[in-house]
Amino acid sequence: ISSRALAQLAVKENLTRVAIFGAEQPWTKAQTAAFSQELLAHGGEVTAQVEPLPSNFDLAAEAQTLLN
């Protein structure tokens, strides 16, 4: 519910192009999917998405991917 509400707020604030920094964990994947679906349903666009493994503590490469 909160992930869908966050997507609705993003659209309301004209943040319709987003990059998602998630994780390879079941609960995070569910939140990411709910946010993405809601954003897309309201005309938004997910421009990039990364989901590093929980064991990855150096996230600089993934962050750089989102910035490009």
Image (tube, helix red, strand yellow):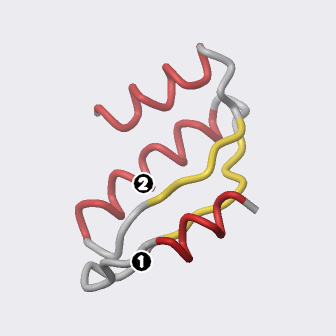
Which residue is the site of mark 1? Answer: 52
Query: In terms of depth relative to the viewer, which is nearer, 19 or 33?
Result: 19
Q: Compared with residue 52, is residue 66 higher up or lower down, i.e. above or below?
A: above
Q: Which residue is found at the position 47% from the left and 58% from the top?
A: 21
Image coordinates of residue 22 in percent, x first then y, are 41, 62
Q: Which mark is residue 39?
A: none
Query: In terms of depth relative to the viewer, which is nearer, 24 or 35?
Result: 24
Q: Which mark is residue 32?
A: 2
Q: Compared with residue 64, is residue 35 higher up or lower down, i.e. above or below?
A: above
Q: Which three-letter amino acid code belongs to the residue tagged 1? A: Pro
Instruction: Give the class, few, some or many, for how many residues have Cα within 10 Å of label 2's Cα (few <14, many ≥20).
Output: some
- Name, please, the residue furthest toward the top: 12
Residue 27: quadrant of the picture: bottom left
For the C terminus, the image quarter is: bottom right
Q: Compared with residue 54, is residue 3 higher up or lower down, i.e. above or below?
A: above
For the N terminus, the image quarter is: top left
Image coordinates of residue 36 in percent, x first then y, are 54, 48
Q: Compared with residue 15, is residue 30 higher up or lower down, i.e. above or below?
A: below
Image coordinates of residue 6 in percent, x first then y, are 42, 29
Image coordinates of residue 7 in percent, x first then y, are 49, 31
Residue 33: quadrant of the picture: bottom left
Instruction: Give the class, few, some or many, for how many residues have Cα within 10 Å of label 1's Cα (few <14, many ≥20).
Output: some
Q: Which residue is found at the position 56% from the left and 77% from the top?
A: 61
Q: Residue 21 vs residue 24: left or right? A: right
Quick one: SS at disc 1? loop
Q: Are marks 2 and 1 in contact (CB under 8 Å)?
A: no
Q: Which three-letter amino acid code belongs to the residue tagged 2? A: Thr
Q: Which residue is found at the position 55% from the left and 25% from the top?
A: 10
Residue 57: quadrant of the picture: bottom left
Quick one: SS at disc 2? helix
Q: Which residue is found at the position 64% from the left and 43% from the top?
A: 18
Query: In terms of depth relative to the viewer, which is nearer, 58 or 14?
Result: 58
